[in-house]
Amino acid sequence: MARPKEFNRDQVIDKAMDLFWEKGYEGSSVEDLVQCTGIGRGSLYDTFGDKHALYLIALDRYMGTSGGPLNNLQGQENSFRDALRNFFQDRIEEAFTGPTRYGCFMVNAGIELAPHDPEVAQKVQGGLDQTEEAFYHVLIKAQAAGELSWKANPHQLARFLLNTLLGIRVLSRANPDRQTLQDVVETALMALG
């Protein structure tokens, strides 16, 4: 008769996610995972499969819990420029005061693994598509409210805002200078016309 598992699966996933987020996939060994999660190697493999499978589960967890700010952005009732400014300022604030200073796990995965890992690439692309769609929704709403010209292409602008967000995420990790990041936000908002 098999022994029952003596650990909380969700807590193990959260701990693995934090490790992968901090050190990346290549920087996290199976021994690191055993140490940080507190479960044995056998239990790790029996429950989650290999390191790659656990990484995919951790990436799903991150992406499943990180959509709140995008939902809030879409629900904003103030002007779209104020809503975007607040959204980007919150992302900058997270970079400096959040519980981690590891950047965005999804962006990190996109840089480290997506170029040569189709499963990670698919997950990252899904997250990018969701983010672009949220920006598109805000821009369409702004056009309907008369805040953004009907001549503006909301698909192009949504991609531009996605690129702005990704740039902020990368810059905040590579060169954490608050003024530089705020300059990026203000320039992006001016570019919207």
Image (spheres, grey):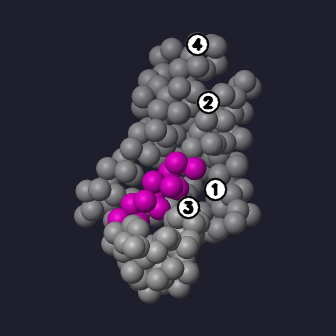
- Residue 162 percent coordinates (x, y): 49, 43
Return the disc, 1 or 2, that comes first in the chain's sequence. Answer: 2
Return the disc, 3 or 1, that comes first in the chain's sequence. Answer: 3
Residue at horizontal 53%, vertical 64%? 9
Is residue 99 toward the left or the right of residue 162 in the image?
right
Q: Nearer the viewer, residue 61 or 148?
A: 61
Q: Secondary structure at mark 1?
A: helix
Tell me the residue that label 3 is attached to: 10
Tell me the residue that label 2 is attached to: 74
Instruction: Give the residues in magenta.
Output: 52-65
* Secondary structure mostly seen in the magenta stretch: helix
Q: CA distance from mark 1 to mark 2?
A: 22 Å
Tell me the residue that label 4 is attached to: 144
Return the disc, 3 or 2, that comes first in the chain's sequence. Answer: 3
Question: CB of mark 3 within 8 Å of CB of mark 2?
Answer: no
- Residue 170 percent coordinates (x, y): 52, 61
Return the disc, 2 or 4, that comes first in the chain's sequence. Answer: 2
Residue at horizontal 66%, vertical 61%? 95
Which amino acid type corresponds to the residue marked 3 in the rendered image?
Asp
